[in-house]
Image (cartoon, helix red, strand yellow):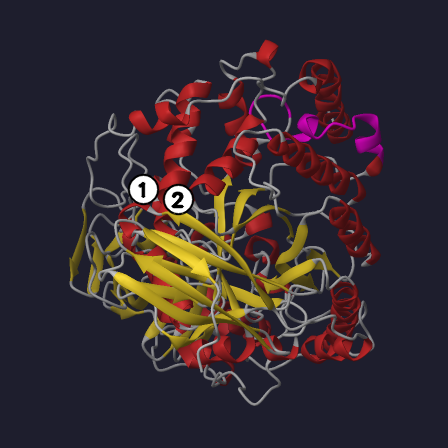
Amino acid sequence: MNNAVKNFFKVLAPLILLAIMAVAISACGNATQEYSDVALEDNNDALADNNDVLTDNNDVPADNNDAPTDNNALADDNTDANDADENAANDLNLAELVPPFSWTEAIALGYVDISDENIGDAITGISTEGLTLTRRSSTSQGIGINIAQLQESFGAYPITITAMASEEPVDSGLGLSGSPAGSEWQSSETSASWTRYDAGADTDRAWNVPPGFLRVLSNDDARSDLVITLTGITVGDLNIIDLAAVPPTEASVFLDWDLTLPPLAESFQDFFWLGNIWSNHGQMSERSTEEKYFHHYNQITASNMHKISFILNNNRDAWQFNWETTDHIVNWAEENDLAMVWHTLVWHTQSRLWLTNDADGNVLTREQAMYNLHRYISTVASRYAGRILSYDVVNEVIWGVDQLSGWNANPNWRNHMRRAGRGIGDGDQASFWYDAFANGADTDAGECGSDYIFYAFKFTRMYDPFAILYYNDYNEQTPGKRQAIAQMVEEINERWRNHELYDGRLLIEGIGMQTHRSIRGWMPDPNLVRDSIIRFAETGARISVTELNVYIAGGGIADTIDPELYPNGGLQALYQEQAEMYYTIFNFYLEFQNYIERVTWFIWQDLPAQQGAWRRWPFSQRPALFDKDRQAKPAFWSVLEALENHTPNISVPVVTDDVLTHDIGERGVGMQFSAIQNNHAPIFWRVTEGSLPPGMSLVSTTGTVLGIPTQHGDFTFNIAAENSLGTGTKVFTISVGAETVITPGGDIID
């Protein structure tokens, strides 16, 4: 069957199936029976905690539309090896090279392999210490060594490889994949060495290592962020690598962030929150990165560390959570007055299969999946209630309906949901939540697979009513998907209005527009962004731009732009086009400032292009406001220039009498203040006079007082809501006795 026929059936089969399903699905979502929350609570003790550490070593993030983003800064004293290789290798006469080689030469000759197959989305660097691998998002990522080619070139002698890690290995530390029998790998503290004694024997193919290859990696799942440095290779007595040979292109000094630039968040503070991503502890302190955050942003989103696979143990039904990093991120944001956004609670990837499938791969029943969904969300949301500005509750549900013609042919959002085994979402793009919720659904009562979305939002609202709840998706600017998302939000919110727990608020309060844009290639028309903002605003939900990137290409792009394709300035000409795109879409955001709550980039800076650039999406396509040397690009200035065209519709916050009180379990009680203003300009809350009860504290970005009072009595204080225009103040009293209650009123305390 030729490719054209295959593609025809690939497109046609799902459409035929959807047409058959349309009648059955059209009635679902109108369930007359509610799942028992009491039953969920009563079953929480049924599962035992059996393990204390995360043990899944093969959890490779794998979705190009929400790509892992712990890769935005280069290691200290390193430059990008791929970039250096790409530029320097073109000038090498490989036939004249003899060992010892520089790392660039060894890579160009094929003895060392840093292609996608080995390093994935990690970053390589070169220094006099060796070849480093950093920003690893998976333990399977490592540096490849072509032992077959080494022995073919230099003789069938034992090969010795030496490596070290950045810190003392916690468990298994450094490891080696593809090692055959008769080999020896020795590791102590931060260094390791390997010798192949059986010269000429082929290796196995563990971890998908190609025949004749080895891969130096770290097998400790809890330490995939370790920096691995390959320090030497010898064949017999022949030294293959010259550590001192660092070409000038590899020895350049990378600059710190320029903190004299106009601060972005302050520039946009009259309009909306402005944010970026958080990676890991070490990266945040690298080269003034932490100071850069405080300078440019007032909101933060964890790139990976709040996803299920980074929190929940992969041991089936163990229900063991790893809170260390998640706690650190939330604490860090709170300590520095940064609004924290949780990304994400329910997603089809970077999850745990056992939440929806049994040990044999069969989907769980609706009741079992409901229990798992409730337990996970209730555990997370109750732990952080009052401290999170907003949650991306459900991420990327709608699939394959980008064109308006596809939507018009089948205008029901449920027919375009990801599901397994039904032709919607292939492979790792499929979601089993739909199938599990459909398994045992009472269709006569209106139950169906799509119910998991409603329940995900319901459970989050139940356990953290202080946060704003978002649905988040990509390609949201395409005409067909735009309609599907809007219809889903409207229908679920209508269902919530008829629910017994309806609290006067929308259930889906926000729509997240990921906004991965290209200046050419896929959907380059920026007006599609404006059209989506208008449609989403019609739902009544607020809007956030959640993963903003503007690429200089629609697919992979080389580090050196082809002068025949881009004769007028090469890369700089593309940067100017990128700046124009940023300028256009920021004008849209400012035009609709009454609906836009925040704008968040999903990358700090550009990285140099590398082999297989699409596999390094989005970093190699230079989508950021800052280049690989952390210098402002034309796009930085064009974003600021857009401000000149708009007047902020900001007003001084007016603090209301309304206080949302919620029991947060062992953490005590939460009390959230509210204020009214014209747009979504950031509000920061302060206690200006008086005092809170001992044991309670205020989260400045959510306006929530949290804690367990440790002293009885009446505590009167001024609560102030401050934005860039002014401050609104009101007096409240918290009375602590048999119960803790709060009342408004009284004279402002001077």
Height in image: 586 above or below 249? above
Marker disc for residue 283? none
Q: Residue at x 36, y 74 (%)?
A: 100
Asked if the magenta segment contains residue 540, the reply would be no
Q: Residue at x 29, y 36 (%)?
A: 319
Whichever of labels 1 and 2 marks the residue nearer the N terminus, that label is 1
Secondary element under disc 2, as helix, strand or loop, is helix
Magenta stretch, residue numbers: 405-423
Give how far across and how far down residue 734 sits, in percent.
Answer: 36, 61
Give how far across and how far down residue 739 sits, in percent.
Answer: 30, 49
Where, by quadrant of the figure, is residue 563 drawn?
bottom right
Amino acid beneath label 2 = Ser
Q: Which residue extends farthest top? A: 444
Q: Residue at x 43, y 81 (%)?
A: 287
**Would you say 204 lies left or right of 167 here?**
right
* Marks 1,2: beta carbons within 8 A: yes
Of residues 173 and 29, the one drawn nearer to the viewer in this rendering: 29
Q: Which residue is label 1 attached to?
A: 56
Q: Which residue is label 2 attached to?
A: 309
Where, by quadrant of the figure, is residue 490 drawn?
top right
- Dot 2, crowdedness within 10 Å: few (<14), some or many (≥20)? many
- Dot 1, crowdedness within 10 Å: few (<14), some or many (≥20)? some
Height in image: 509 above or below 326? above
